[in-house]
Image (spheres, helix red, strand yellow):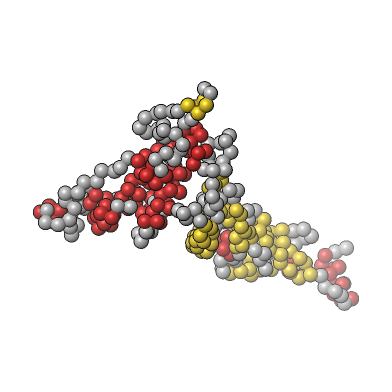
Amino acid sequence: MGVDYYNILKVNRNATDEDLKKSYRRLAMRWHPDKNPSNKQEAEAKFKQISEAYDVLSDPQKRAIYDQYGEEGLKGMPPPGSQSAASFSNGSRGPSNFKFNPRDADDIFSELFGNNPFGFETMGRAKSTRFQTGGAGTFGGVNNAYQSYHDGVSSSTSHPRKAPPVETKLPCSLEELYAGSTKKMKISRNVMQNNGRPAQETEILTIDIKPGWKKGTKITFPEKGNEEANQLAADLVFVIDEKPHEVFKRDGNDLIVNHKISLVDALAGSTLNLKTLDGRDLAVSLTDVVTPGYELAISKEGMPIAREPGNKGNLRIKFDVKFPSRLSGEQRGAIRRILGS
């Protein structure tokens, strides 16, 4: 289909007129070039793209053509080999005579926000740059345009206030952080309707947890918090929280496991059988004499390293040697003979 206007406007294919207006208002205010002075070129392109998407989807005829024939249909040229190609060529049916001419982005903006949304004669950007006197030797213009539209905004700023981020913990098991997982989070939030009244909206957010993410990792969903009058919605931030594990403890990219062994195994060696976080049976040969504080590191059996795909930390085994509670005289003598005095 080429350009996906529904995706650009962040709506589904069943979006109503109110859905389109609501999404356009939010995106247009966010990407208006006058609101992005440090990134004006990208904002200009985004603003025009959003306006074109709204122009098409808000017009029943254009939307019907777009839904059936895609971007090519708007240009009067159906995709080659499509079922409707013949009808375009013979002129019997289809929008063969239709030619889409995008409306001016500023005209669309003014249409939805009013002829003078910024409180000045013009927006001072695309068509003509005109300013009007605002007092003794002062001028109004694009730098403080948003003050007139957003009540309650301080006169010292040109942007609507944004609520502080809302953070919430996202508990994850060590297995989920090891292998990665996908979580679906249902949120309910207040949104402002066109009539200025709040309404509750529910939405399912998808969070893709990457292997190796650590406690404290933040996933941000821009402007998914509650909406309030005269300010931008807060960002919704999920913060990874690690659940305690029965066997393993995480230390950075390493995994630590405590293992009890007998004094005999500590001195004579043994084979340890461990179950990894991804369910594998791991056999570890213990050949060194286990002394107090001894730690055995198994390379690349720890946690995945998020910034180094395919690489992992170490599995560190810490030993707890179980000493016998009593020894017979014969056993004591045998130990002395073997180990010496």
Q: Nearer the viewer, residue 232 or 318?
A: 232
Is residue 27 positioned above or below 87 on the image? Answer: above
Residue sitting at x 11%, y 53%: 91
Q: Position of residue 273 (x, y in %)?
A: 64, 70
Is residue 132 positioned above or below 28 on the image? Answer: above
Relative horizontal placement of residue 92, taking residue 160 as reference (left or right): left
Is residue 49 positioned above or below 324 on the image? Answer: above
Relative horizontal placement of residue 338, taking residue 135 as reference (left or right): right
Q: Is residue 312 visible?
A: no
Which residue reaches farthest top?
A: 137
Which residue reaches farthest front?
A: 135
Q: Position of residue 132 (x, y in %)?
A: 45, 28
Relative horizontal placement of residue 134, taking residue 163 as reference (left or right): left
Task: Classify the position of the C terminus by image quarter.
Answer: bottom right
Relative horizontal placement of residue 264, taking residue 120 as reference (left or right): right
Q: Nearer the viewer, residue 168 or 50?
A: 50
Q: Nearer the viewer, residue 62 or 213?
A: 62
Corner quadrant of residue 292: bottom right
Is residue 184 positioned above or below 135 on the image? Answer: below
Residue sitting at x 35%, y 41%: 107
Q: Position of residue 300 (x, y in %)?
A: 58, 56
Residue sitting at x 40%, y 56%: 19
Q: Is residue 258 visible?
A: yes
